[in-house]
């Protein structure tokens, strides 16, 4: 079965930057700055972000289990354990990922109507 | 209502389909619900009530992390794009030759690539009704007949009816897993 298609690709920071003609000194300085920026971007994306799902009164327990299996590829027992944690404790951390993947999961979970958010681990 | 998974070999296209058989007025009620959410998807975002604007804007992070400001905007754009994607699917299903339009048929057949979208749309209707009427845990536990306000009572019935349809779909999908 195909998964829900509506999520657009997530834009990476630094994409689509302007390229200009520079002097050698400017180019060297610019390269250093670029390297620093790239490294900061990589560092930011390498950090772990938690994906949380919050309890809500509308989504049914079986639907939440179904969505966890579908989006997060959990087996049924794991999906049910997280669903019960959401139900009883108000929230569950369902994934710990780099930023891009965490954003992707939040989008996918929200596409099914779940209250999903992300925060730094 | 009954729902059953029709396996790949027997189905058109070979990827399987979920077949829903409705009883009584179930299909008509579903048709009306989908017509309502179709109109909702068509509505201008700026004209929506505040509760629905908030719903469609979504929340990326509970902590309002400034590092996520741009990503939160991306999420909002994505959520708004779902409205148009889902509207296209509904326009197709509710068209005169669509799968939901035949008044004499009590059967609805969803191909495997339509099921997730169908569930998401039904759930959108439930969630937007709940957001609009402020349904919380206590309200979800009461008998809808005990609610005096007609609009709220009808909305709560509809939220429960659509949950009933979704539960049948999920039970039918268990046949796919087996």
Image (cartoon, rainbow, N blue to C red):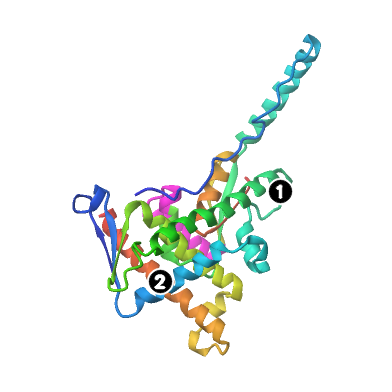
Q: Position of residue B124 (x, y in %)?
A: 51, 64
Spatial CA span between label 1 and label 2: 41 Å
Residue B1, compared with residue A104, is above or below; it is below
Residue A22, compared with residue B76, is above or below; it is above
Q: Which residue is mark 1?
A: B65
Chain for numbered disc 2 = B
Mark 2 packing: few (<14 Cα in 10 Å), some, or many (20+)?
some
Q: Position of residue A76 (x, y in %)?
A: 37, 55
Q: How many marks?
A: 2
Q: Residue furthest top?
A: A24
For the magenta stretch, what is the residue range? Answer: A69-90
Magenta stretch, main secondary structure, is helix
Can residue B119 be seen? yes
- Quarter of image, res B174: bottom left
Q: Residue furthest front?
A: B96
Q: Is residue A85 magenta?
A: yes
Q: Earlier in the sequence, mark 1 or mark 2?
A: 2
Q: Position of residue A117 (x, y in %)?
A: 60, 53
Residue B156, compared with residue A36, is above or below; it is below
Q: Position of residue B82 (x, y in %)?
A: 53, 54
Q: Of the numbered discs in the image, which one, if any, rests on residue B10?
A: none
> Considering the numbered disc 2 on the image, is that residue within a helix, a strand or a loop?
helix
In the picture provided, is B105 more to the left or to the right than A41?
Answer: left
Instruction: Tell if the residue under mark 1 belongs to the same chain as the one under mark 2.
Output: yes
Q: Which residue is mark 2?
A: B31
Quadrant location of the C terminus of chain A? top right
> Considering the numbered disc 1 on the image, is that residue within a helix, a strand or a loop?
loop
Is A9 or B143 nearer to us in this picture?
Answer: A9
């Amino acid at each position: 079965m195909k998964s829900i298609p509506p999520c657009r690709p997530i834009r990476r920071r630094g994409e689509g930057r302007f390229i200009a003609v520079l002097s050698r000194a400017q180019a060297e300085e610019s390269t250093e700055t670029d390297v620093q920026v790239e490294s900061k971007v990589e560092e930011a994306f390498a950090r772990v972000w938690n994906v949380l799902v919050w309890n809500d009164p509308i989504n049914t327990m079986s639907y939440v289990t179904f969505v966890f299996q579908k989006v997060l590829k959990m087996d049924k027992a794991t999906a049910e354990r997280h669903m019960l944690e959401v139900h009883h404790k108000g929230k569950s951390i369902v994934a710990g990922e780099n930023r891009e993947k965490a954003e992707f999961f939040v989008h996918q979970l929200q596409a099914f109507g779940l209250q999903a958010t992300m925060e730094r681990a | 209502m009954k729902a059953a998974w029709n396996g790949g070999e027997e189905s058109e296209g070979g990827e399987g389909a979920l077949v829903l058989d409705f009883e009584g007025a179930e299909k008509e009620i579903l048709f009306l619900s989908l017509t309502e959410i179709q109109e909702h998807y068509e509505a201008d975002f700026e004209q929506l009530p505040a509760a629905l604007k908030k719903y469609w804007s979504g929340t990326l992070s509970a902590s309002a992390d400034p590092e996520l400001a741009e990503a939160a905007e991306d999420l909002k754009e994505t959520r708004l794009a779902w409205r148009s994607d889902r509207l296209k699917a509904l326009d197709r299903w509710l068209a005169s030759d669509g799968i939901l339009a035949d008044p004499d048929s009590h059967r609805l057949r969803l191909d495997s690539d339509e099921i997730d979208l169908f569930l998401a749309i039904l759930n959108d209707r439930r969630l937007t009704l709940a957001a609009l009427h402020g349904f919380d845990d206590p309200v979800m536990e009461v008998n809808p007949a005990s609610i005096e306000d007609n609009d709220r009572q009808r909305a709560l019935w509809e939220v429960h009816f659509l949950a009933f349809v979704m539960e049948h779909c999920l039970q039918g999908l268990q046949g796919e897993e087996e």
